[in-house]
Image (cartoon, helix red, strand yellow):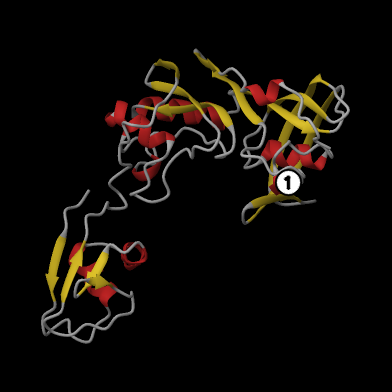
Amino acid sequence: MEPERSLEVGAAEAGQRLDAVVARALGLSRGWVRKLLDAGRVRLGGRPAAKGAILRAGDRIDVLPFARPDSGPIANPDLRLSILRESAGLVAIDKPAGLPVHPLAPDETHTALSALVARHPELIGVGEGGLRSGVVHRLDTGTSGVLVFALCEESFREARAAFAEKRVAKRYLARVHGPFAGERELELRLENRGSHVRVVESGGRLAVSRIHALETGDETSLVEVFMRTGVRHQIRATLAELGHPIVGDRLYGSPLALERHWLHAASLSWDAFAAESEPPPELKARATGAR
């Protein structure tokens, strides 16, 4: 974290916008300063300031402690993690549903990466660096299961190459609405549309999934999904397209508002690295009243 700063407005800065002056003085982008302003981290005359405030000579600006956008995530040693495997510069954790993979802002600490940084500070700067340091792949916030991080550059490059070359075996479990039986393989083209993706005839990205029924029920079924590609919301959108949305996934058609959608990353493997996660109880039990 950067320490608290105090600035006094001189004659040269008089008449200028607050966000422009702070950005220049601290070596930050104006966009980042606006985020600090929105968070109440910048005060003018002792009060929270508006980003468009026009300064006068003699004004006092206080910038409360803040994290720079390139400083990496803040460690959160109080957030517990379940480690599934650690080897060859990689660590696989059992991510619970509801926990984001990485922070979107420097002061966000309730993420898997923030917890891992407390154990492995050396991963800061690895891969994409910054707030995505060490992130090999992602899971939706509402999805639980195997999540892998790289602790060094060499391991990051090798892992990303395995994903790019489609050498990674990915198995998911999902409880879906309706009676799903047998096995289906589906190729779709998915296109981003804000918070979700949609199926399109052309364009987008190719998403290939194989779905196999493990348990078929009248109201819900348990399926396993093998991803041959890695497209955003691939499993969620594919199952919805088949008419079997994931239980609790309101974004893709589930009628149930639950704390999470019932999708779990059960295993992930490539080359000599492999990790497995036991499914949570809600995937093992039938959903009463799910229609």
- Front residue of this view, candidates 155 and 74: 74
211 left or right of 93? right
Q: Residue furthest front?
A: 288
What amino acid does circle 1 point to? Tyr
Q: Quadrant of residue 189?
A: top right
Q: Position of residue 234 (x, y in %)?
A: 68, 39
Q: Quadrant of residue 90?
A: top left
Quick check: 75 above or below 67?
above
5 left or right of 262? left
172 left or right of 151? right
140 left or right of 191? left
Q: Position of residue 167 (x, y in %)?
A: 59, 23
Quick check: 248 above or below 220?
below
SS at circle 1: helix
Q: Position of residue 20 (x, y in %)?
A: 27, 74
Q: Position of residue 89 (x, y in %)?
A: 37, 21
Q: Is residue 260 visible?
A: yes
Residue drawn at x 33%, y 27% as measured from the top left? 152
Q: Residues within 10 Å of mark 1 (few under 14, many from 20)?
A: many
Residue drawn at x 26%, y 76% as measured from the top left? 18
Quick check: 32 above or below 229?
below
Q: Which residue is mark 1?
A: 252
Q: Quadrant of residue 85?
A: top left
Count up the numbered dots.
Answer: 1
Q: Is residue 172 visible?
A: no
- Front residue of this view, candidates 265 and 250: 250
Quarter of the figure with the C terminus: top right
Residue drawn at x 38%, y 51% as measured from the top left? 105
